Image (cartoon, rainbow, N blue to C red):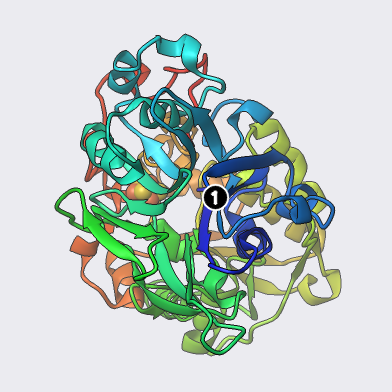
Amino acid sequence: MCGVVGVYAPGQEAAPLAALALFALQHRGQESAGLAVGEGTDVMVYKDLGMVAQVLDDRRLPSLRGDRAIAHCRYSTTGATVWENSQPSFRIGPRRAVALGHNGNLVNTRQLLDGLAGGRDRLVGTSDTDLLTALLADEPGADLVEALMGLLPRVSGAYSLVAMDGTRLAGIRDPFGIRPLVLGRLPSSEPGETQGWVLASETCAIEVLGGTYVRDVEPGEMVVLGDSAGPRSVRFAEGREQLCVFELIYFARPDSYMLGRNLYEVRRRMGEELAREAPADADLVMPVPDTGAAAAAGYAEASGIPFREGMIKNRYAGRTFIQPSQALRQRGVTVKLNPLPDQVRGRRLVVVDDSIVRGTTTRRIVEMLRRAGAMEVHLRISAPPIHHPCFYGIDTQIETELIASRLDREGIRDFLGADSLAYLSIGGVLSGIGLPRERFCFACFDGRYPIPVPYDPGDRKSILEGTGVAG
Ligand code: SF4
């Protein structure tokens, strides 16, 4: 996933604003955080492994001066969680100094690496973002915008970028708009003060700054900040939006809006659809906290079965799905969720979650509920089964790790130890969203990849280090 932010706030310090906006995007990446600021023609970067509040604390921020900033929190799809892969990535090249934050995953890393003068030895880290930054620092062009216009047509994959050099800041969305990126206006603190602007992965990051959502950055569009006239739109490619539907189902915060829809409401309606498609005879509906909450509320409303919390989440533990290794994921779930035995004991439960990827977390949840005395556990999932890997920035690159690619429905139910299991259909997901299928990427459900992925798995990953890395 990853969260990206860009702030241009003439007359103000941009770093505290960008840090606050990034804090609102913490759910998109918990491995590292960082910020680049621009003052005059200088660019300074501070980044480290850790959560946003740990890295960008009150001791650091005052020394990060300037009216422009980009910020990033990282979730690696595969590969090492090391400082060198934290972002913003920064490079001083023969033509410019540039900082870059990337949400997504490129699919033509090998070709891009072949085109980098000096090759792999030029890279500091092993992420595709590092490669992109090195290419951008080398790219001919009078300024950042010209360089991006030269480079982007050679780049294939999913990318929502924030880029900054000594004079400009740009927000860019790939021609398929796989990952989201929105533009907002910052409030003026003084009458007559020059307007400020913010770019962010989600609208919740604009909200925390007291800003106003203006519009989505369009697929194939670059929005350039730094001019007194306001944001400038530059189109580098024809766009055809194929937004990742998982952003709406699970990844993005429920208080964010995408394509004009509030995501809590979208998920609640998906829960209603799920109750219609897959009813269950049960005493209580309960969510897997927190991401199953909205769909569980919808299921309860549509089914007439009472809603009750049955598990409590330790809010300070990371998302299990976001942990980079299976070992950490397995350890994570035991520290993260605790049952409420008095609510669960002797009851027939409908347990609503938003997805099953590998199945290990869900299996532990079912075990935990049974140990707490649940009489029956009926799993209801507010998304279809995930049959295919994602090559656009989500940690499902290995098909055999996906439980639905190995087992049929009954096999999955048996593995999970549930009394019944049902998934929402693609039609049910679309009814919940209220938009046509053509607007979205559904590739992990139906295998129809909007951006061609290389046939050779070695080209998809493993290019920049032994196991492959994404932004
Ligand atoms: S393959 Fe799945 S997770 Fe990846 S971008 Fe498409 S819908 Fe999203």
Total marks placed: 1
Pointer 1 local density, CA inside 10 Å: few below 14, some 14–19, many at least 20: few
Query: Horizontal placement of 154 versus 366: left or right?
Result: left
Residue 218 in view, yes or no: no
Q: Residue furthest left?
A: 238
Give percent across and percent down for residue 295. 51, 74
Badge 1 marks a residue whose secondary structure is loop
Q: Residue at x 34, y 68 (%)?
A: 216
Give percent across and percent down for residue 411. 47, 43
Q: Residue at x 77, y 62 (%)?
A: 315
**Which amino acid type is marked by label 1?**
Gly
Give percent across and percent down for residue 152. 26, 38
Q: Residue at x 46, y 18 (%)?
A: 464
Q: Residue at x 48, y 62 (%)?
A: 200
Residues 439 and 189: in front is 189
Give percent across and percent down for residue 60. 79, 50
Where 373 falls versus 280 (above or below)?
above
Q: Which residue is mark 1?
A: 40
Where 80 falls versus 257 (above or below)?
above
Residues 423 and 265: in front is 265
- The quadrant where residue 48 appears: top right
Determine whether the beta carbon of the residue marked 1 sits less than 8 angstroms from the nearest atom of ligand 1.
Answer: no
Query: Horizontal placement of 79 versus 148: left or right?
Result: right
- The quadrant where residue 337 appears: bottom right
Where 423 falls versus 79 (above or below)?
below
Residue 369 in view, yes or no: yes
Residues 317 and 463: in front is 463
